[in-house]
Image (cartoon, rainbow, N blue to C red):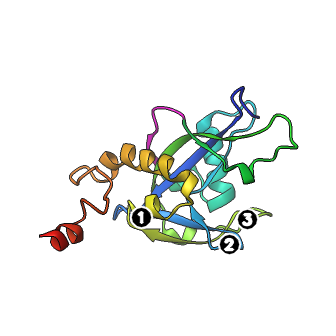
Amino acid sequence: MIDDDGYRPNVGIVICNRQGQVLWARRFGQNSWQFPQGGINPGETAEQAMYRELFEEVGLGRKDVKILASTRNWLRYKLPKRLVRWDTKPVCIGQKQRWFLLQLMCNESEINMQRSSTPEFDGWRWVSFWYPVRQVVSFKRDVYRRVMKEFSPVVMPLQEVTPPTARTSPAYRRKRG
């Protein structure tokens, strides 16, 4: 299902633990890491798609997580031209995403990337909250930055909500001064 502008409706999932770390997943057979995400099927709400993708990609169900937040708006990214499948109709030029912030309520041993017959991921780890913004593939970085900035007050209500940059990091200030 591609919209009139060429974007595929999709959900993204940020799972956090009680320490404010987020689940970072390695794409199957690659050294590429990202948050779980997947398409919204016709007739499915974004929340229904999120729970389906959560089970397919991470092996967790409704009882294993709690929804803390979702993005207010659709967030879009364009695919690099080399990744666009020009021979399909309609042509998909990118994704428009609704993101969900979930808190893990079960033991992390319940996470199982192999529940699907065609797993998307073959590994995972907990990383610091802002880590994915710098590490995700370049064409997704702006969306990740916007998602994490929107979710940061929920995960870290007493901490700084501005994503760290080279110019604001303590190490940068020490080098200059």
**Outermost residue, front side:** 176
Q: Quadrant of the N terminus?
A: top right
| Residue wearing tag 1 | 131
User: What is the distance, in whole Å, between disc 3 and disc 1 at their CAs?
Assistant: 24 Å
The answer to whether residue 168 is left or right of residue 72 is: left
Q: Residue at x 55, y 57 (%)?
A: 138
Of residues 99 and 103, the one drawn nearer to the viewer in this rendering: 99
Classify 14 as above or below 131.
above
The answer to whether residue 166 is left or right of residue 40 is: left
Snapshot quadrant of residue 146: top left
Question: In terms of secondary structure, where does tag 2 sit?
Answer: loop
User: What is the distance, in whole Å, between disc 2 and disc 3 at their CAs?
Assistant: 12 Å
Question: In terms of secondary structure, where does tag 1 sit?
Answer: helix
Q: Is residue 153 magenta?
A: no
Classify 90 as above or below 103.
above
Please tell me whether mark 3 or mark 1 is closer to you in this view.
Answer: 1
Residue 166 screen position, x and y as percent: 30, 63
- What amino acid type should be assigned to the residue bearing mark 1? Tyr
The magenta segment is 66-74
| Residue wearing tag 3 | 119
| Residue wearing tag 2 | 30
Mark found first going from the N terminus, 1 or 2: 2
Residue 159 screen position, x and y as percent: 22, 54
Mark found first going from the N terminus, 3 or 1: 3
The answer to whether residue 22 is left or right of residue 12 is: left
Give residue 47's mark: none
Is residue 148 shown to the viewer in this render? yes
Using a 10 Å C-alpha cutoff, classify the residue at mark 2 as few (fewer than 14 neighbours), some (14 to 19) or many (20 or more): few
Mark found first going from the N terminus, 2 or 3: 2
Q: Residue at x 74, y 54 (%)?
A: 82
Using a 10 Å C-alpha cutoff, classify the residue at mark 3 as few (fewer than 14 neighbours), some (14 to 19) or many (20 or more): some
- What amino acid type should be assigned to the residue bearing mark 2? Gln
